[in-house]
Image: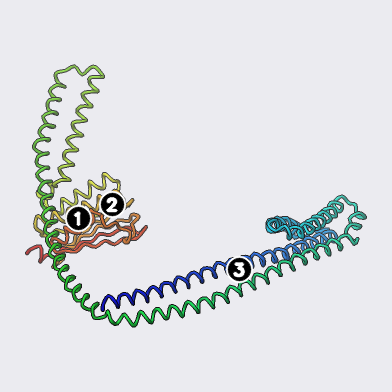
Amino acid sequence: MRWTNIRKIAVSLTIAIIAAVLMVSINEAGYKRSLQALDTLTQTQSTRSKLNLLMQQILDAETGLRGYLLTGKERYLEPYNSANAAISGSMDELRRIFIMDPKELASFTPLARQVERKTSEMELSLRLYRQGNNEAWRFVMFTDIGIENMDAIREHIKTLVESIDQRAQANLADIEQTLSLSRIGIATVTALGILGFFMYLRQANALQHSHQREQEIQREERNRLEEVVSERTATLTELATHLQQVREDERGHLARELHDELGSLLTAAKLDVARLKSKIDTSTPEVSERVAHLIETLNSGIALKRRIIEDLRPSSLSNLGLTTALEILTREFGERSSIEVECSLEPVDLTESTQLTVYRIVQESLTNIGKYAKASHVIVTVHNYPTYVAVQIQDDGQGFELASMRPNSHGLAGMKHRVEAVGGRLTVASQPSKGTTISAVIPLAMVNA
């Protein structure tokens, strides 16, 4: 029974799909044909407007020239010169349009010759006037040659406009025919679609009970999966916290190894160089330069070792406390990066692990600012409130869109996990060109617990 219903639904859907495909095909064909006709109609109207514009430009040029010849005032030449330049552009545009149609090009060619004659006539009148030959320019201006040219131009333009209007009427008739065929086709296909949809509705009720059953099974499976996901999430969170602690322990171990082993080796090497320096002849410039370079290299190595150790496990945090360690961290960052750092640090009573969390948040934030922010000023604040500690790092850098922040931004993810591991909350606020603010709130009750 169920398979029979499914087959009937499949047949109904097939009819509906075929109807939809036919409807889309008819619409697409009608759309393309109408679009082509409209495009041709638009070009036709544009050509008609260009012809009218050409006629107006010729009249403007003739009017401006007559005003100049009769008054001798140069300001009348401005409309003449403008219209004369525009006539050349209009003729080029019309030539590009009519060159595609040999029949219309045959009608356009006489128009082009008449326009060229008219412009040559006006140029000749202007040249004779400027040469002082009054009788000649008056003869050219006041004979019937100009009127005949203008009448010929009007006649050619009228012929072209009539041809364009006939083509526009044909395009309109084509659009009307396309719309009529589309209406008939859409009506037929719509009837088929309604029939298929009706058949589909008749058979859909037969599957409703089985669908409800499947939904109940899916709901139970989803609940089970949610429980598994919650358990796995808790396990992964615990594992991440453990790995973070292991990482800190390894960093502390590596810092001690570097301090004890590498530190003693570099110090011994520096002492050996000092002894050798006292026993060798350093009067030779090359020897003196080499010894000085060796001492400088050892000093750089000792400084690099000290900086690496401080990055791995800040000794100032365990020896001097969080406030002093942050002051040293921000001061050294400002010296290295040439960024002004302003601090407002209040003493806080936190456990050693929580102090390390705060230190790492500030350290990671300053590292990101130095790499990406292009900031000139940074504010680091630590405020001690009765129920929580607030940490904030704010810069005036280029900022970024929070929506474009990559999911694999491990620096921010690590900071967020550190804060959430002690029951706190970390937020990031940023806008392009308005800087970035990283805020962490750590509740004292959870820390003390």
Residue that label 3 marks: 38
Q: Is residue 84 above or below residue 207?
A: above
The crowd level at tag 1 (other Cα within 10 Å; few <14, some 14-19, many 20+) is some
Front disc: 2 or 3: 3
Q: Are marks 2 and 3 in contact (CB under 8 Å)?
A: no
Quadrant hosting residue 126: bottom right
Q: Position of residue 302 (x, y in %)?
A: 17, 35
Q: Amino acid at mark 2?
A: Ile
Front disc: 2 or 1: 1
Q: Which mark is residue 369?
A: 2
Secondary structure under badge 1? helix
Q: 201 left or right of 24?
A: left
N-term-proximal mark, 2 vs 3: 3
Q: Are marks 2 and 1 in contact (CB under 8 Å)?
A: no
Name the residue: 29% across, 50% down.
340
Secondary structure under badge 3? helix
Residue that label 1 marks: 414
Q: Position of residue 433 (x, y in %)?
A: 37, 57
Q: Amino acid at mark 1?
A: Gly
Front-most of residues 281 and 449: 449
Q: Is residue 49 above or below residue 418?
A: below
